[in-house]
Amino acid sequence: MPINTSYFDLKNARLQTRRFCASFFAPMTVLGLAACQPDEPPALSLEEAKQATASFEGQSFTPPPKSIVDIEMLLASQPPLDPTAAKRDKAILASKLPADADENTHGQFYAERTMAAGRLGLLDQDVINIRKAYPYVEAVNDDDLRRYIRRHHAYAEYSIGNYAKSARLFEALIVGKTIIDRTVLAKIYATAGNFERTSVLLAELDEILSNAQNYRKWDRHGEAWTGSFYDAKAIFLAEQGKLTEAERFQRLAVKHRDTYRVQMRSSPVDASRSETVYGRTIDVLASILVRRGKLLEAEVILRDAIRDSLARLGRSSLRTNSHLTRFSEVLSAQGRNGDAARIAQYLLMTYPKLGFSPSASDGIRTELIAGQSLALQSRWRKAIAAFERAETGLVGKSAGLRNSFPRSPAHAIALTRVGRNSEAVGVANGLLKRELSTVGEDFVTTALVVCII
């Protein structure tokens, strides 16, 4: 079916899928679709992957508790949120550029605003300010700040789906045998579907790392470099649907980055960065496990990550809240809609206290989870309100970023249940267009949306 097919020409498709729809509209179908992904496990290319993952596969698995009471009690026992840091960052965002500012001051001013926006989870403000800082990067008289502006600009464009621009910026950063920028660039190309360029970068990294033990900084950063390479390799494999091998490499990434963060705990700046990167690596592993249908394993990993992040960073940390967001997603995928909704509601009450904007990425994602979970409890009006808040947060975002957020037919279903049928058709049509352009007509979500229309 061509992507530009008229939705009114889908009559035959609706007739063919009617029986399927009648049997498939169960709670798990709306939220558990993440597990319906291809899985082609080829042989591993690195011997270390075989050795390092043997211990994972040989361990006995202890299922997680069937309740989230322990996590809720842990959250309740945390000290009250301190809004001081958020107020300070909001003051930075509200500050004015001095009238007599030179180019160095311009660069520093907008870089500081970018950092403040990032701490508040304000992705849109982050991007706006780093773009304003970039033209002044050469005039900045701080070497570390110059590197931060260049690299963060590339990251920011990637975060909003501007893959081509981000790739160009990272290509410019690659000099000699640099490792980290190559790994990030490999992830960008993998995400954008340029597997040929990704393969070249990964081959270069493999060769560089084979000799990197002789580098002056290997003892300090070797574990980080190795973990970053495995992370890129895992994402490359996952984007191709090779999820078994992707899981193994992502576990290696977790192992090396865990070692690195322990090494860095004596350095406040490096400790903060290493904890953040480690947390992201855990979230990627959980995502891969969900796609493989290993929902209980994903839950166990995220429970441990939440406990660890609460102990080290507290409940006001962006990393803690990111783990909680993924935890709610996993609960939703299991059909535990009440639990998922309670975690989502906790997050939605927490974000304003932290100074987060409704347009913050994790806030939007949480609203979508809440909407899905509430719909599956037949709490239609509350579900619709959550979906609408999410859509409001997405206004002005790039197409790439908008498409990165998970959607389901639950929004359209909820609208039909309260008699808002024309709106339901509009939502379903939008979702259908997206599904046809991304996963095709044979994917189960596409068929479900056809049923609704």
Image: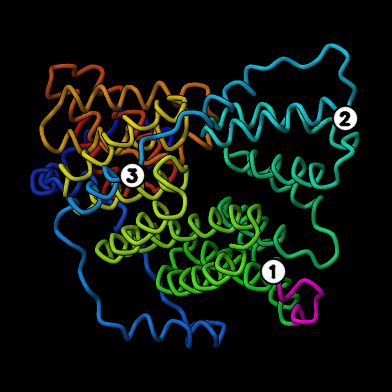
What's the residue type where badge 1 is placed?
Answer: His
Q: At 88% across and 14% down in the image, what residue appears?
A: 100
Q: At 25% across and 51% down in the image, what residue appears?
A: 71
- Crowd tier of the residue under label 2, counting other residues whose Cα lies within 10 Å: few below 14, some 14–19, many 20 or above: some
Sequence-wise first label, 3 or 1? 3
Name the residue carrying label 1.
Answer: 221
Which quadrant of the figure contains the C terminus?
top left
Q: At 37% across and 68% down in the image, what residue appears?
A: 39
Residue 47 appears in the figure: yes
Disc 2 and disc 1 in contact, CB within 8 angstroms:
no
Q: Nearer the viewer, residue 172 or 126?
A: 126
Q: At 40% across and 73% down in the image, what residue appears?
A: 244
User: Tag 3's secondary structure?
Assistant: loop
- Crowd tier of the residue under label 1, counting other residues whose Cα lies within 10 Å: few below 14, some 14–19, many 20 or above: some
Name the residue carrying label 2.
Answer: 104
Mark sitting on residue 281: none
User: Tag 1's secondary structure?
Assistant: helix
Q: CA distance from mark 2 to mark 1?
A: 30 Å
Name the residue carrying label 3.
Answer: 78
Q: CA distance from mark 3 to mark 1?
A: 33 Å
Q: Nearer the viewer, residue 295 or 444?
A: 295
